[in-house]
Image: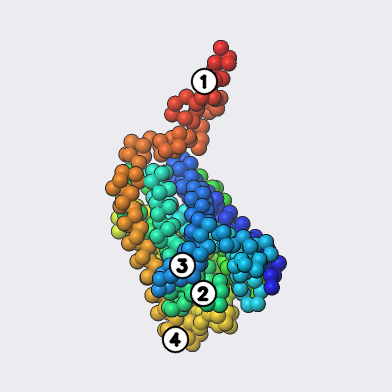
């Protein structure tokens, strides 16, 4: 039986998660230099286009299709989504079944498919912050194509594809089923996955010119706060939407997302006050994202008090972790490792401490609720498995693209401005002369300016 309210909530949640990618673009875009902001916006925006096409062609099928190889990858039964259309327009007798989740109600298959697409889009977009200011646009685009196919789709199958989800006899991924790890909305498949890849690419592309003496000041802090706010807003779809229904569990996830994020902001600001003597706007925005990351895997399995604890711990640890790049020597431009990898690890592992079946009977009791070390060990194994797989494969992909000469811009273009070198545009007119014939953002005269001059003559 189709539940219209649940279907509406999932579709709204999908739209909220889609908004997170432009929000991430503003968050990252505000932190880079003025001459790199368009490139950063484009690196995020192109993920919408690339992954959107791949998901329909075969991504959804490889992620949620019947397992075809020991819990590692799905099949091609839903390639092209040709078998999914019947489920959307009345559940035709010869079409696929609706998604039986949760309980006796159902979702149209395409509603669930589009919700999960937005997760697939934002995950590679998160990686882009680690290589800001120095990546070629088409090299990055090629990386997104390959990485989505051989890293994200398999890992999402491991974590999100449950036995019996698309049918009574359907089998899914090994982390969700054989291992039994808990990840409500993507701490492993999204944040640890992206954070590990970000670390790999930071190593592959190397340091920016002048780093670490010149770290590059954020060119627009209001953009950063705007982006963080859009992320927080969209994250309600990310977390509460993962209940796949307008139900009590959605309310729990919504509440936990709110309080953990608020607590993480405070945790980060306290660290800044103690270390530097002043709390910063950039720190508040980064703390919010750290809390959102950490609560993502746990939001459906812990209590509000547990969420506050997770938020504070994430805010403190992520604030401390961002300085590791200076000690270890890798140039993670926008702290993808410190926020997403560390935050994802914190949230995933802390389920083993704060998880409680009083919130969700499908979860498990953590160490603080009498559950012992069993679930904690499972969470650690899941986190490390995803970290290792993503890091190694991302290194291989990154080095292959770099070897082909297609990943890092030249030193000249990095210094002069990656926006004009890669996109023939600049975000801002610094001359104050905005007339089309007087000033162009293009390195050569724009055809429209030439035509205007000819008309005047």
Which quadrant does the C terminus fall into?
A: top right
The label shown at residue 372 is 4
User: Compared to 440, does 376 lie above or below?
Assistant: below
According to the picture, the residue beneath numbered tag 3 turns out to be: 74
Q: Position of residue 364 (x, y in %)?
A: 51, 82
According to the picture, the residue beneath numbered tag 1 turns out to be: 450
- Tell me if I can see residue 359 in this picture: yes
Real-space Cα separation, disc 1 to disc 4, in angstroms: 74 Å
Left or right: residue 81 versus residue 128 is: right
| Other residues around mark 1 within 10 Å, as few (<14) / some (14–19) / many (≥20) | few
N-terminal-most mark, 3 or 2: 3
Real-space Cα separation, disc 2 to disc 1, in angstroms: 62 Å
Number of numbered discs present?
4
Nearer to us: label 4 or label 2: 2
Q: Position of residue 383 (x, y in %)?
A: 41, 71
Nearer to us: label 4 or label 3: 3
| Other residues around mark 3 within 10 Å, as few (<14) / some (14–19) / many (≥20) | many
Real-space Cα separation, disc 3 to disc 2, in angstroms: 10 Å
């Amino acid at each position: 039986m189709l539940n219209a309210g649940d279907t509406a909530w999932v579709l709204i949640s999908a739209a909220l998660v889609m908004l997170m990618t432009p929000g991430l673009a503003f968050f990252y875009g505000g932190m880079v230099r003025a001459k790199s902001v368009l490139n950063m916006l484009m690196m995020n925006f192109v993920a919408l286009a690339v992954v959107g096409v791949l998901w329909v062609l075969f991504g959804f099928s490889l992620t949620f299709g019947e397992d075809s190889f020991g819990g590692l990858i799905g099949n091609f039964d839903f390639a092209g989504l040709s078998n999914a259309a019947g489920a959307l327009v009345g559940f035709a007798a010869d079409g696929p079944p609706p998604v039986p989740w949760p309980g006796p109600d159902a979702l149209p298959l395409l509603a669930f498919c589009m919700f999960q697409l937005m997760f697939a889009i934002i995950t590679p977009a998160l990686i882009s912050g680690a290589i800001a200011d120095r990546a070629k646009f088409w090299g990055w685009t090629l990386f997104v194509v390959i990485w989505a196919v051989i890293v994200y789709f398999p890992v999402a199958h491991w974590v999100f594809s449950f036995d019996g989800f698309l049918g009574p006899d359907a089998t899914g991924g090994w982390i969700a089923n054989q291992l039994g790890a808990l990840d409500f909305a993507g701490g492993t498949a999204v944040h640890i996955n992206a954070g590990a890849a970000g670390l790999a690419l930071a190593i592959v592309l190397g340091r920016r010119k002048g780093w670490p003496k010149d770290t590059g000041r954020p060119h627009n802090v209001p953009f950063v706060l705007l982006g963080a706010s859009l992320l927080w807003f969209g994250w309600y779809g990310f977390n509460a939407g993962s209940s796949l229904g307008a139900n009590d569990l959605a309310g729990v996830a919504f509440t936990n997302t709110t309080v953990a994020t608020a607590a993480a902001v405070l945790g980060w600001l306290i660290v800044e006050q103690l270390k530097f003597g002043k709390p910063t706007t950039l720190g508040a925005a980064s703390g919010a994202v750290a809390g959102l990351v950490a609560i993502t895997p746990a939001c459906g399995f812990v209590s509000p008090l547990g969420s506050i604890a997770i938020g504070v711990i994430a805010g403190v640890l992520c604030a401390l972790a961002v300085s590791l790049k200076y000690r270890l020597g890798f140039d993670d431009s926008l702290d993808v490792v410190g926020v997403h990898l560390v935050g994802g690890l914190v949230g995933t592992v802390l389920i083993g401490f704060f998880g409680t079946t009083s919130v969700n009977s499908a979860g498990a009791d953590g160490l603080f609720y009498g559950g012992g070390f069993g679930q904690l060990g499972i969470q650690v194994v899941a986190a490390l498995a995803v970290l290792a797989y993503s890091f190694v494969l991302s290194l291989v992909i990154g080095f292959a693209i770099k070897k082909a000469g297609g990943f890092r811009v030249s030193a000249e273009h990095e210094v002069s401005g990656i926006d004009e070198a890669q996109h023939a545009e600049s975000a801002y007119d610094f001359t104050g002369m905005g007339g089309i014939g007087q000033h162009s953002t293009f390195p050569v005269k724009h055809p429209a300016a030439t035509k205007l001059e000819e008309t005047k003559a």
